[in-house]
Amino acid sequence: MTGRDPRHDDDAVRRAAKGYHEPPPTPHEEMWRAVEARLGERPGPVPRERRPFTPRRLFARRGVGGWVGLAVAASAILALGVGLGRVSAPPTAPSAGPSVASGPAAAESESPTGVRLVAERHLQASESLLRLVQADARAGHVDAQVGGWARGLLLETRMLLDSDASRDPVLRELLQDLELLLAQVAVLDGADTPERARTELDLIARGLHEQSMMTRIQSVLPTVDAGFSGT
Amino acid sequence: LDEQQLIERVRLGDQVAFRTLYDGNVDRIFRLVFRMCGDEDLARDFTQETFVRAYQRLDQFRGDAAFSTWLHSIAVSVALNGLRRVDRHRKRERSLDDAAPLAAPSRRGLEPDVRERMKRAIDALPEIYRTVFLMHDLEGYNHGEIARCLDVAEGTSKARLSRARARLRDVLSDLAPEAAR
């Protein structure tokens, strides 16, 4: 492309690039419904009413009480408990000198950053699972490993909901919604027929869309976020 | 109602006014984030997140720039941050998605290998160049809009576009007769 008018070359580049990620029609209404649902749930200009944390709604929605194996539960709880203990334990002081932190400063230093770290790792793992579920929904089949993976994550989610992580209202709400989704995924491998499993899978994928679960997970995970000052 | 009046009404809790702002901007936002991510699920998530964040942060909007510009700056940030986080997942999904076009008839115009090479070349561009290229050359934003969205000088936007095009020209140079048709 050398030796010619650069504008001609740029036109050629534009033409060749035109089909790059060609957008489909905008799903106006579907996205609006999801946005509208979230406007009522999250802080904003409008006073809002948070949904109270009611773990029982999970069981009211689906009978999930019987499939959690005791051994799996015990090992998952142990693993997460050890992890929580390790990362949230205060660092050992190198000397026995007097502490200079007291009052609000000391309280700040005792914030549950370790639990937060565990929660972030948990969300990353959950995101991976949900991506797999989305891919399965598109492919129309259920991966055999999904159910077991979801059950482990479901246990961790519930533990996090009972931990200091749930003191953050945004994280708590996210974990509550994640709990519901994971409970649905966890029972996929128990579906009577492949057709039923596909139907359930579609419902889960739709729930992922409507709740913007991926983006909400990403927004909770640490990012280099630009400031939006309206300039 | 003009844009400022709509914003004031949203601040007072009027979701119908917010719907009007949504209707006026959602197409461009969705198109842009789709160009950036190439995945409809992600594009929907990013678009929805953009509007939710805008709603939550409307008190921070000072009105120095147009609402759409402010909204686009949120969209670009949401998409870039989201893409960084899900990049490893997208690699896996891309391998699934790539299976479909194999059976599909080739598109009219450029040969598939030109398109494929261009796609790879755009994907390989550094993020700062790719974003400007997509906004300017594919979605028709001008350098002023891009500069405000990305919080850079207009000259920076022009320089990045120039570098992006130069890299793409280099990649396509051996396909020039085909690509130039």
Image (cartoon, rainbow, N blue to C red):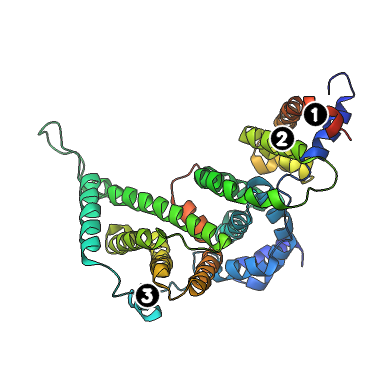
Q: Nearer the viewer, residue B161 or A179?
A: A179
Q: Nearer the viewer, residue B78 or B109?
A: B109
Q: Which residue is mark 1?
A: B175
Name the element at disc 1. Answer: helix
Q: Image quarter for residue B170?
A: top right
Q: Is residue B20 left or right of residue B109?
A: left
Specify the amino acid type for callout 2.
Arg
Specify the amino acid type for callout 1.
Leu
Q: Which residue is mark 3?
A: A58
Q: Position of residue B58 (x, y in %)?
A: 59, 58
Q: Residues within 10 Å of mark 3 (few under 14, many from 20)?
A: some
Labels 2 and 3 in the same subunit: no
Q: What's the chain of the residue with tag 2?
A: B
Q: Position of residue B76 (x, y in %)?
A: 63, 46
Labels 2 and 1 in the same subunit: yes
Q: Position of residue A35 (x, y in %)?
A: 59, 66
Q: Quadrant of the C terminus of chain A?
A: top right
Specify the amino acid type for callout 3.
Leu
Residue drawn at (71%, 67%) of the image: B20
C-alpha distance separating marks 2 and 1: 9 Å
Q: What's the chain of the residue with tag 1?
A: B
Q: Residues within 10 Å of mark 2 (few under 14, many from 20)?
A: some
Residue B97 showing in the rendered view:
yes
Q: What's the chain of the residue with tag 3?
A: A
